[in-house]
Amino acid sequence: MKRPVLAAFLLATSVLAPAALAQTPATGPLAEAVPSDLPRTARPIHYAIHVIPDAKNLTFTGTEMVDLQVYERVDALTLHANELEISTAELVPAGGAGRAVPLTQTFDREKQTVRFAAPTPIEPGTYRLQLAYSGKINTQATGLFALDYPDKRTGETVRGLFTQFEAPDARRFAPMFDEPSYKATFDLSATVPANQLAVGNMPIIREEPLAGGLKKVTFQTSPTMSSYLLFFALGDFERASMKGPGGVDVGIVSPAGSGEQARLALESTPPLLEFYTDYFGVPYPLPKLDNIAAPGQSQFFGAMENWGAILTFERYLLIDPTITDPATQNYTYTALAHEVSHQWFGNIVTMAWWDDLWLNEGFASWMETKASARFRPDWFPLLERVNGRETAMGYDGFATTHPVIQQIRTVSETNQAFDAISYSKGEAVIAMLEAYAGEDTWQQGIRTYIQRHRYGNTTSDDLWRAVEEAGAPGLVEIAHDFTLKPGVPLVRAEARCVEGATVLHLRQSEFSRDRKDETAASPQSWKVPLMIIPASGAPVRHVLEGEATLNTPGCGPVVVNGGQLGYFRTLYQPEMVSALASAMPRLQPIDQLGLLRDNFALAQAGYQDSAPALDLLAAVRTDANPVVAMGAVARWGQAYGYVEEKDKAKVAAFARAAWLPRLEQLGFDPKPGESLADTELRGNLITTLGNMGDANVAAEARRRFEALASDPKALDGPLKTTWLAIIARNATPAEWDRLAAMAKAAPSAVERQAYYGLLGAAKDKALAQRALDFALTGEAGTSSANIVAAVAGQHADLAFDFALANRAKVETLVDASGLTGWVAGLAAASRDPAMIGKLETFRDASPADERRGIERRIAQVRERLAIEPRLAQEVAAWMAAQ
Ligand SMILES: [Zn+2]
C-alpha cells in the first residue's frame, strides 16, 4: 500500500465519531488456545458501571449491568471479582421481556472469581446481569486507590482517587470478565462531590447536579477494549488542554495549582500523536487523550496506558524547575512516548493472554526510543537503549532467566512478567528484527498487523507473519529463536590479516553468568543477525548459525555488533580488543558504549580478565559523547566499589585524571541552553567523584547545603537532589534531622517524595536504622517503601532483616502484587555470605509462583561473593601495570 499522506489521515480522524468506530468485536466462546480462569461459555458485550466513592472512609458502592452472550446451556455464570461484597445479583433475558432471575453467589478467593448460580439452567442467548456491590479503596496503586498529598495552593492534605487495573485488578472495581481477550464496551458513571473533577477514558457526556453537594457524571461509551484499560479518577484537579491532530482534545490533568508544570508534557503530546498516526497508518481513535498526574508513587511502575486516560505518577509527568533532575526529565519524555504508543499497540490491538505481555511492553519500549530519537536526538536515546539491553542481558545471563514469551498461569506469574526481559530484552529483540527487515518493510508489516487486528487480540506470531509477508524472509525463525529460547548468545571472534583483508572467524555459543561448562549441557543456539563494521568499506551483514569464516575488507579494528543492533555478546580475541581500544575515539559513540559494557560483563562472568575492559575504559576520551562518558564514569565507580580498601585511592585517582577535566569544563552549575545530556553528565560526575571522596565536590555540597539556612531556594534547579544526595549519604544526625524537616515541610508531593527517599541514603548505620523505624510509621505515605529500599542500597542486610522482622507492617507499605520480589530485591547489594541462606529460607517459605525473583537475587549475591575478590585483584594488577 502506498504510504498515505498525513493530511488525509487527519481528515479521516475528524469525521470519526466514537459511535462510528470500525469495530469487529470477537464473537463466539474464547478459543481453547487462549488460557482463561473462566469457563468458555459466555462473553461480555457491554458493561454499564456506576460507582459512588466514599473517599473519606476508603470504600465505594457500585451498580453494574453486564450485557453478555451465553453460548451453551449452563447452570451458572462466572466472572472475576476480588475483595468485593455483592449485595444483589440477578439475570434478565435481553430485551427485558422476561422476569429478573435472582442468582446465588459463590466466591473462589484463590482464582478471584465469583460464580452466579441460577435456579434453573440458563439457555444460550443474550442476557443482562444486574449487580449491586461494594468494595474498598486501597492506599497502594491497586484497583481503586487513594493518594493523600499537600494541596499546592493551601498546603492542606487532600485526597485524590485513581485506578490501576493492569494486570488483574479491574476485578477489584466491579465484577468482570477480567482477561485481555474479553473485550467489551464500557459505560461509566459516578456520583461525586460537585466541586471535584472526575476523569474517565472518554469525555464527560453529561453532568447532573444532585442534592448534598454532589453531582452525577456520565462518560461517553468507550470503544471495544480490554478491562485492564478502564480508568477512573476523582479529585481537586485542574486540566490544561490543547487540540491535537484530527481535533483530538489533549489534556494534562494535575493537582490543582500545578500550572506551568504541565506545559512540557502537554505540548509534547500532539507531535507524538501525529508521529504515531503516521507510523501506524491508523488515527488515534478516541475523541480525547488525557494524562493524569497522580501525586504519589508505586514501587513497580511509573505510568499506565489506560485508553484515553494515561495515568503517570506526578514526578514523571510534571516538570518542576526547582527539583526535576535531568534523568527524570528524560524519563518523563520517554514514559510519555511509551504510553502514547500503547494507545495503538496494546489498546487497539491487544495480546490475547499475558504470556505475550512482552509484545505490548517490548514494542512500546522500542517505540518510545524511536519517537525520542525523532524528537529528542540530543538526549541520545539510541545509546540509552544499549544500557537497557545491558540490564536485560544481565538478567538473561543467569540460569534463572526465562524466555521472552513465557507460560503464565497465575495472577502472581502475571505480575512477575513485568520485568527487564519483557521490556528491555523485548525492545532489543525488536530493534534487531527491525534492522534485519529494514525500517520500511518493518513499518509496513506493523501497519498491516494493526489494520488486520484492530479491536482484537493477537499472539506474537501474528506480528511476525505480518512483517515477514511485508518482505522479510527468514524473520519468523530469528524471532522465534530470540523469543522462545531464554538466554544470551555469545559470539567468539578471531581475526587474521591476510594480504590486506581480514579473515574473520566467528563461533557462536551461549553467554552465561552461572553455568560456565559449555560442554556439559548442550548450549542454546540461535540464528544471530550480525552487522559487521570492517576495517574499511561498507558494513557486512551476516546471519550466524554455529560457525562462519568471513572475509572482510581491510586490516584493523572490526566491530562485530555494529550499531549495537544485535542481542548478543562478542568475545574478541585479545589482539582485536587492543585494535579496538586504539581506534576507540574514531568508533561510533554507540559502539564505544557497547564495547565497554560488553567487555566489563565478560570480565565479570569470567570469560576474560578485566584488562581488556579497563584498556577500553582508559581509551574513552574526556570529550566523549555524554552518554558514553556517563557509562565510563559508572564503570570507574563500580571498580571503586569492589577493589580492596588500599586500592580505592588509586582507582579514584584514575577516575579523576580521566574525568575531572570534563567536570571542570562543565562547571558546577548548568549553563543556559546546554543539552539535557550535559546536565545529566554533570550530575553523574559530581555523584561519582563525590562518592570517591573528591574534596572539592564534598566541600561544594556542604557549602550549598549551609546556604539553604538563609536562602531556601539556594539549591533549586536540576541538580538539587544530586547535591542533597551527597549530604544524605554522608549525613550527620543533625543533617539527617534537617532533611527530615525539609520532607515534612515540602510544598508538593514530588519534593516530599524526593526528600523522604534521601533519608534512607545514609552510610551511618544508626541513621539507617532511624530511617527504617521512621518508614514503618507510614508517615511518609507511598514514599515509605522507598525509604526502606534506599537503606538497602548501603545496608542491604539491615534492610532485608528489618523487612522480614516487620513483615506485617511492611506489607501495608508495598503494592501487594510485587511484595515478594520487592523484599528479595532489598538483598541485592548484600556482600554477606549468610544472605544466601536467608534468601533460600525466604524462597522456601514463599508461594511457588513467586519464587523466580528470589532465585535471581540468590544468583546475584552468590555471583558477587564469588567474583569480587578476583575482579579486585585484576583491577589492582592492571593499575600497577599502567
Ligand atoms: Zn508499557
Image: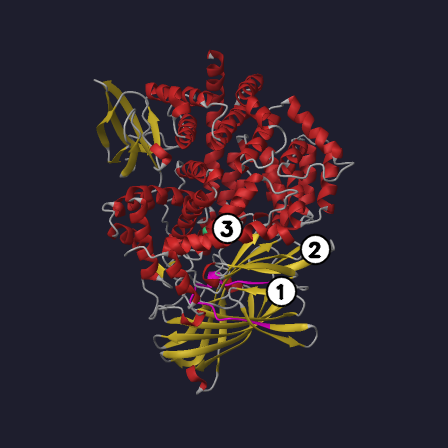
Q: How many marks?
A: 3
Camera-nearest residue between 234 and 839: 234
Read off the residue under disc 3: 336
Whole-number angstrom distance, CA of label 3 to CA of label 2:
25 Å
Camera-nearest residue between 751 and 90: 751
**First along the sequence among labels 3 and 1:** 1
Question: What are the residue bounds of the magenta stretch?
Answer: 217-234
Camera-nearest residue between 413 and 313: 313
Disc 2 marks a residue whose amino acid type is Asp
Read off the residue under disc 2: 151
Tell me: residue 126, above or below residue 740. below
Q: Is residue 733 magenta?
A: no
Q: Is residue 695 left or right of residue 182?
A: right
**Residue at 28% across, 45% down:** 437
Label 2 CB sits under 8 Å from any ligand 1 atom = no
Cβ atoms at labels 3 and 2 below 8 Å apart: no
Q: Residues within 10 Å of mark 1 (few under 14, many from 20)?
A: some
**First along the sequence among labels 3 and 2:** 2
Q: Which mark is residue 132?
A: none
Label 3 CB sits under 8 Å from any ligand 1 atom = no
Q: Is residue 443 left or right of residue 183?
A: left
**First along the sequence among labels 2 and 1:** 2
Camera-nearest residue between 298 and 101: 298
Residue 503, horizontal then vertical, whole percent: 23, 23
Tell me: residue 119, above or below residue 345. below
Whole-number angstrom distance, CA of label 3 to CA of label 1:
22 Å
Read off the residue under disc 1: 197
Q: Is residue 733 visible?
A: no
